[in-house]
Amino acid sequence: MKRKNKRKIIFLSTLALCIALGFAFHTKETKMIKKVEAMSQGSWGLSFQEAGKSPVIDVNKEELEQLEGYYLGDEENKKIYLTFDAGFENGNTEKILDALKKEEVKACFFLVGNYMEKEPELVKRMVAEGHIVGNHTYHHKDMDSINQKEEFLKELTDLEALYRQIAGKEMKKFYRPPQGKYSADQLNWAKESGYKTIFWSLAYVDWEVDKQPSKEEAISKLCERIHPGSIILLHSTSSTNAEIMEEIIKEWKNMGYTFGTLEEL
């Protein structure tokens, strides 16, 4: 009887410890999510204050990373990460891909459903040439309007299904919120689904197709704002980006930068 009681006491003690640890972990994660939520403004924003230095943001980098959110690599390493957002195709992506191939640089293209439906051959080329195709949601909705987990995840899984149909393989789990709009809940839902949410630390106004910056203006801004660990956001709809792609890659290389992939983050 004494031995049975002793085993019972050990079992109950172990069970109580497991419950306590689980509660502590859940409480810590909940507090961390609320803290990120409190700091977030719902839309990603940057403030470039010094050439060659990473920008100022209003979210703590380490706390963001706990929710698998990333905007910056190693600030002590001159490795940079090139990404493109593509909501539609207007004839510039092939030129960009040609430049990437010539300079042996791999990038991530964040695509939406409309793009994949209309440009399956370009999607296949991206994959064949070793680029990552990331998830930019199926419909490119205003994510501020989504507060239900099921609706949020459907935007990701519907695009995954289309990619699987086109590429014949699973989509890699990198997600970029349309317009940079997000919430801590959405970061957590993406994390639970195996996704890393990818923001950016370098961008410029390149998305207005009828009001494109000059070649000189673009190169000047992109060289001034580049910094160690940069996650670069460019738009593949930009005719200026298509024009300068080979040159800007060479400029960054001449500045001592090398190119990594999001998988290396």
Image (spheres, helix red, strand yellow):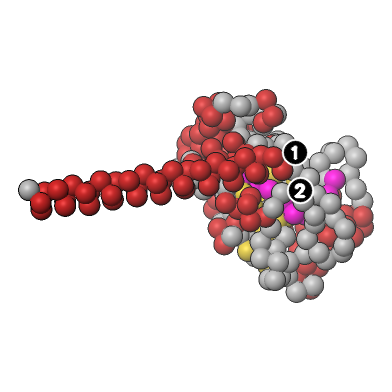
**Residue 222 placement: quadrant:** bottom right
- Relative to 154, 201 lies left or right: right
Query: In the rendered image, which quarter contains the C terminus?
Result: bottom right
The residue closer to the viewer here, 150 or 8, is: 8
Q: Name the residue at the front extreme.
A: 2
Between 249 and 74, the residue placed more toward the observer is: 74
Q: Residue at x 41, y 49 (%)?
A: 21
Q: Quick one: label 1, few (<14), some, or many (20+) residues within 10 Å?
A: some
Residue 200 drawn in magenta: yes
Identify the residue at image location x=92%, y=55%: 217
- As rendered, which of 74 and 130 lies closer to the eye? 74
Q: Looking at the image, can residue 233 be seen? A: no
Q: What residue is disc 2 on? A: 58
Task: Report the side of 242 relative to 11 (left or right).
Answer: right
Q: Secondary structure at mark 2?
A: loop
> In this figure, which residue is indicated by the disc labeled 1?
41
Above-or-below relation of 259 to 171: below
Residue 70 position in % (x across, y down): 64, 52
Q: Is residue 141 left or right of residue 7?
A: right
Sequence-wise first label, 2 or 1: 1
**Prevailing secondary structure of the magenta residues:** loop
Residue at 60% of width from left, 31% of height from top? 138
Q: Which residues are magenta?
A: 196-205
Q: Amino acid at mark 2?
A: Asp
CB of mark 2 within 8 Å of CB of mark 1? yes
Label 1: element kind: loop
Which residue is depicted at the point 48% across and 43% down?
A: 26
Q: Position of residue 15 (x, y in %)?
A: 29, 46
